Every structure is written in C-alpha cells, then in structure tokens.
Image (cartoon, grey):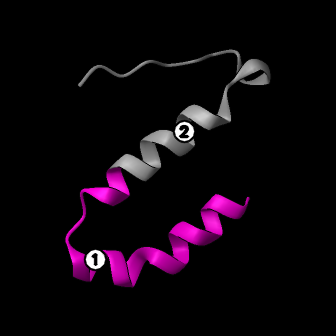
Amino acid sequence: YLAYINHDLANHKVKNDRYVGEKLFGKLPALSKLTLSPKFIKAMLL
C-alpha cells in the first residue's frame, strides 16, 4: 500500500479517513467486529 502524508491538516478531508476506516472494519473477522464495534461507532461520531 502507498501511504500519503498530508502536511496541510487545515484542508484535510475527513471523509477519506472515514471511507478507509469503514473498508478496514469490513475486512475484520466477525468476532473482532463484535468487540471493536463500540470503539468504531464512537470514532464515527467524532
């Protein structure tokens, strides 16, 4: 994977982070989804 470092945080697009987080969460095994879902939901609400 290629990582991109954005040094301009004032113009950072948060929706890109949300998209990647949803994709990573979707690839987790079912047990991990159950245990991590409260933290994931909390992060989505921030």
Disc 2 marks a residue whose amino acid type is Asp
Packing grade of label 2 (10 A; few <14, some 14-19, many >=20) is few
In the displayed structure image, the side of residue 8 where residue 17 appears, left or right: left
Q: Give the SS element for disc 1.
A: helix
Q: Which image quadrant for residue 41? A: bottom right
- Whether residue 41 appears in magenta in the rendering, the answer is yes
- Asked if the magenta segment contains residue 32, the reply would be yes
According to the picture, the residue beneath numbered tag 2 turns out to be 17
Q: Residue at (62%, 62%) from the top-left corner?
A: 43
Looking at the image, which residue is at 36% across and 22% down? 3
Residue 25 picture quarter: bottom left
Return the x and y of residue 7 as percentages of the image width and height.
63, 16
In space, the residues marked 1 and 2 are separated at their CA atoms by: 20 Å
Compared to residue 42, the image places residue 31 above or below, namely below
> What type of secondary structure mainly makes up the magenta span?
helix
Does residue 22 sit above or below 31 in this rendering? Answer: above
The magenta stretch spans which residues?
24-46
